[in-house]
Amino acid sequence: MTQIEFIYNLDSYKEGLALILDKRYKNQRTIIFCDNTETSHELSDSLWMNPGFFPNIIWSEKLSSDVQPSENFLIGSQFNKYFDELVINVSGQECSFFSRYEKSIELVLKSDNEKASARERLKKIRECGYEVKLTDAAN
């Protein structure tokens, strides 16, 4: 069963990625679920500029889900069968394919809208029988 963690009280998604990737998930095949083109590019740029090494590609609809990229990090809103270890949700919305992964992390910003949306996702996930770890980034 998918392990799920919500990390909340973040100032930005960049902060959340920097908080977890280098320390915990540097070498995992990871999809960063993002359904916004502008945010995808911002996150990609921040990963390339990070002191760690996070080769990434922005996944577009032009690429087939059967393609196996050499990068460890995909940013986009599509499932790829070669990336089944970790999905990090930075969309502020439900990632419908989270259960295909060993681990799913929801990054939640401090805004009231983000928190309200996260509460709804958390409720649905718990109703489906998943245990959820909650982590306050402010601590």
Image (cartoon, rainbow, N blue to C red):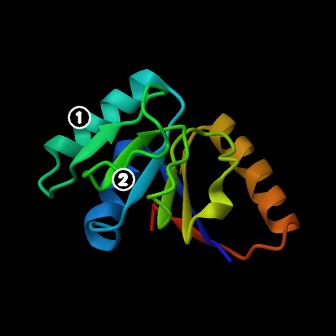
Indicate the secondary structure of the residue bearing disc 2: helix
- Apparent side of residue 22 relative to residue 116 in the rendered image (left or right): left
Q: Tell me, yes or no, if residue 122 can be seen here.
A: yes
Q: Which residue does the numbered mark 2 point to in the structure image?
A: 17
- Where is residue 106 shown, x and y percent of the image? 57, 55
The correct choice, above or below, for 83 with respect to 45 in the image is below
Q: Tell me, yes or no, if residue 12 can be seen here.
A: no
Q: Quadrant of residue 28?
A: bottom left
**Which of 41/19 is in front?**
41
Tell me what residue is drawn at x 47 percent, y 46 percent: 66
- Where is residue 58 shown, x and y percent of the image? 35, 34
**Crowd tier of the residue under label 1, counting other residues whose Cα lies within 10 Å: few below 14, some 14–19, many 20 or above:** few
- Apparent side of residue 90 relative to residue 29 in the rendered image (left or right): right
- Where is residue 95 shown, x and y percent of the image? 65, 47
- Where is residue 5 shown, x and y percent of the image? 58, 67
Indicate the secondary structure of the residue bearing disc 1: helix
- Image mark for residue 45: 1
